[in-house]
Image: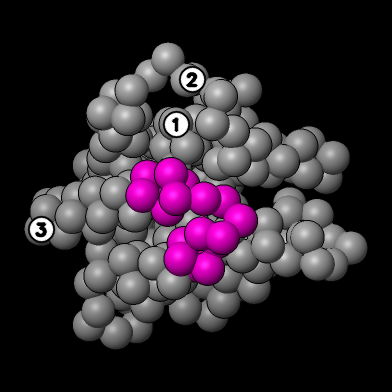
Amino acid sequence: MKKKGRNMYKRRENYYLSYLRFAYISIYKRLLYIFCGASLVAISLQLFLIENKVIDGGIVGVSIILSHISSIEIGLSLLLLNTPFFFLGYSYLGKRFLILSLFAISILSIGTHVLEPLPSVTNNPFLVIAIGGVILGLGVGIVIRYGGSLDGTEVLAILLSKRTPFSIGQIVMFINFFIFSSSIYIFGIKEAVFSLAAFFIAYKIIDLVIK
């Protein structure tokens, strides 16, 4: 599992860096695919996960926790927390990555804002985990596959991995450990277990999409 996790995050980095991958696809088509991916993530968050207190890892998870304990909208949190990391990674990951990631996070922020008034599609925990996790994984995977990112912690992990003996996957998992541990105190142990289950499903779907 650890080796597969390292490989997946290495593949993500390759998609961020490679200018040759999908070179035949114009920037406009890339933006269209990323729009669709970010919209799927917004649907997963607002119509399945957030209302049922199920969180994702990374900045998305932090934003869900912040929106629960404060009056800050999740879309605004996503934009404010992610943007500094994307600019931080500009020198290593390049202008294309910065533009595509800022576009992706903007669409996600707008999408979560638009969908926020709508109720959750279901309160059945198994459907929330399964459907929410699959839609989340598809959306994130599409964004990554076409050169963007929705999670600033991945950018931080990529940069730290160049300066420490730890891999990208290890750093991301370390960050997510604290996020999911915090969710136990905010939402409860049951919700934290559901969050881990949804995260695992999303993780596997992302891996399939970017392969």
Which residue is denoted by mark 1 in the rendering? 146
The chief SS type of the magenta part is: helix
Tags 1 and 2 in contact by the CB under 8 Å rule?
A: yes
In front: label 1 or label 2: 2
Q: Residue at x 67, y 57 (%)?
A: 158
State left or right for residue 109 relative to residue 197.
left
Identify the coloring: one colour
> Could one spot residue 150 in this view of the protein?
no
Q: Position of residue 172 (x, y in %)?
A: 67, 59
Which residue is denoted by mark 3 in the rendering? 117
Residue reaching furthest bottom?
70
Which residue is denoted by mark 2 in the rendering? 22
| Sooner in the amino-acid sequence: mark 1 or mark 3 | 3
Tags 1 and 3 in contact by the CB under 8 Å rule?
A: no
The answer to if 94 sits in the magenta stretch is yes
The magenta stretch is 85-101
The answer to if 174 sits in the magenta stretch is no
For disc 3, the neighbor class at 10 Å (few under 14, some 14 to 19, many from 20) is: few
> Could one spot residue 139 in this view of the protein?
yes
Mark 1–mark 3 Cα distance, whole angstroms, equals 30 Å
